[in-house]
Amino acid sequence: MCNITACRAIISLVMVGAMAKSVKQTDADNIVLRARTEAEALGQLYELYYERIFRFCVHRLFSKETAEDVTSIIFLEVASRIRSFGGRTEQDFQNWLYAIAANQANAYIRKTSRRKRLLAEAAGSMTDNTTDNSSELNWPRLYAAILKLNSEHQTIITLRFFENMEFEQIAKILDAREATLRVTLHRILKKLRRRLETVFEGEL
Amino acid sequence: MFKNEDDFKKIVGRLNIDDKPSPGHRESLRRQMISVFDKSGEEPITKSRSLRSTIMKSPIPKLAAAAAVIIIVVIGAYYLKPDDSTTMVDIVPKQPTPTGTQLVALDIKLPKPMFVGTPQDVKVEYLEKPLGKPRPPFYAPVGTKNVAIGKPVTSTDEFPIIGKLEWITDGDKEGADGSFVELGPLEQHLTIDLEAEYNIYAIVVWHYHKEPRVYFDVVVQAASDPDFTVNASTVFNNDIDNSLGLGVGKDMHYTETAEGKLIDAKGIRARHVRLHSNGNTTYDVNHYIEVEVYGKAAE
């Protein structure tokens, strides 16, 4: 008898938990749906994602100043296109937002002169940074090596290791197959390791 | 150094990155975004609706619109018609040669095309118009053959992202995966050592022909020494803004196809051939499927 009561209590708790989760999920999804027509809902999404997108841009573009510029471009594009956004859930919105962010970051560094400037900035930080242990891989050095990969590979590295995303989500953002991504990532890391082993600061 | 994905994740986790945004930017961007959102709500719908209703109400604008469409189609058909006076025809040497050398058409084996039809124009300035038909034969002295086959290749990217440098002179020109070599981003170049001096008449390069693309800053040079100081010459250069610093190019951009790009080398004497590029219209990396150098042992 006692066991039955305990079971009922557990089931009730699980159901309440599931309902709470479902309500929370629905709230976030509702914001996404409302954001197509209501500025206030779009503002809420902005607050939810501004910092994440800014961080993504810093990780892709090194310079905070450049990251601010590209973050602006990303959110202004979101504002002008959200009315025709076809997704229904927060997850859809997140994938869409990161796809825009990845495209804009890639568009920025596509110009050789800009890429060279970012590399120079990273190289400058490398020499300025005297507090870091030189045997340890520091951010400017890693960034310089990542910047020498092709832009799609740079995006995969950033989404996977800096944004801590699962392969499933990265696949949706980049419109790629999950299995292909796993193999590609393995190859990118191999390539990155070789670059880090052979490229010295002087070569930047 | 890291050994695997988990190692790399730990390294990234330990990095000290200043990625805190400034509050000022956050606020001003929010205002701008809401303003853009508000503007995007009204204008396009009302404008397009009013324009459409104006056209549909009266027969005169309808007729005018139809006439305009017909005129555009006629003008477009006239200008897009394949023109025999394009660059591809210009590269065929006139016969007979002043020296009386016997010329024969080069037998260039082409790979299987990876897409059908004339490539659509990619939006690139100073782009060569697609020929719309097979390339005319290229004539060279009897005995001219591909002297690059199996010859060693070196590159600024010694660890290609995909493939191996030796694939570039292995005779495989197919566009499928497993045939092309992907070099890193930014400007990259590769050099083929022909291992002897040749009179070079033509260089044919296939960067990538799985889809129509344009590669930027394609510069092809030849020289007698590996440092490109003796008998150095540039046989092709479409770096129109001199971004590689090798001189302003006057050749046109071109769209990649299974035919490859045939460059008239005019019989220059050289042992080393170097090809530069700087990304393409799809990605910023560089690709090569095959490079053929048609020549004869130097006289």
Image (cartoon, coloured by chain):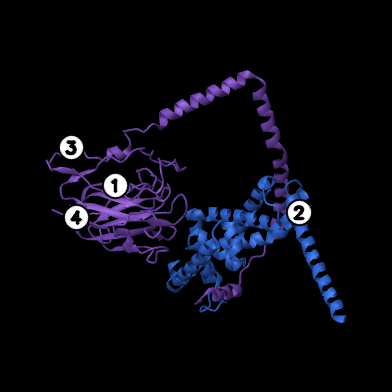
Chain colours: A blue, B purple
Discs 3 and 4 share one subunit: yes
Please report whichever mark, 1 or 3, sits nearer to the chain's N-terminal start.
Answer: 3
Image-quadrant location for residue B183? bottom left
Q: Residue at x 27, y 53 (%)?
A: B292
Chain of the residue under label 1: B
Q: Tell me the element at label 2.
A: helix
Chain of the residue under label 2: A
Q: Tell me the element at label 4.
A: strand
Q: Tell me the element at label 3.
A: loop
Please report whichever mark, 1 or 4, sits nearer to the chain's N-terminal start.
Answer: 4
Report the label total. Answer: 4
Q: How far apart are marks 4 and 2 (CA)?
A: 70 Å
The answer to whether the residues at label 1 and label 3 have Cβ atoms under 8 Å apart is no
Given the image, on which type of amino acid does mark 3 rest?
Gln
Question: Which residue is label 1 attached to?
Answer: B263
Circle 4: is it few (<14), some (14-19), or many (20+) Cα within 10 Å? many
Which of label 3 and label 2 is nearer to you? 2
Q: Which x, y percent locates residue A7?
A: 82, 76
Given the image, on which type of amino acid does mark 2 rest?
Ile
Chain of the residue under label 3: B
Question: Which residue is label 3 attached to?
Answer: B95
> In the image, is A34 to the left or to the right of A52?
right
The answer to whether the residues at label 2 and label 1 have Cβ atoms under 8 Å apart is no
Question: Which residue is label 4 attached to?
Answer: B198
Discs 1 and 4 share one subunit: yes
Chain of the residue under label 4: B
Q: Nearer the viewer, residue B63 or A17?
A: A17
Q: How far apart are marks 1 and 4 (CA)?
A: 16 Å
Question: Which residue is label 2 attached to?
Answer: A31
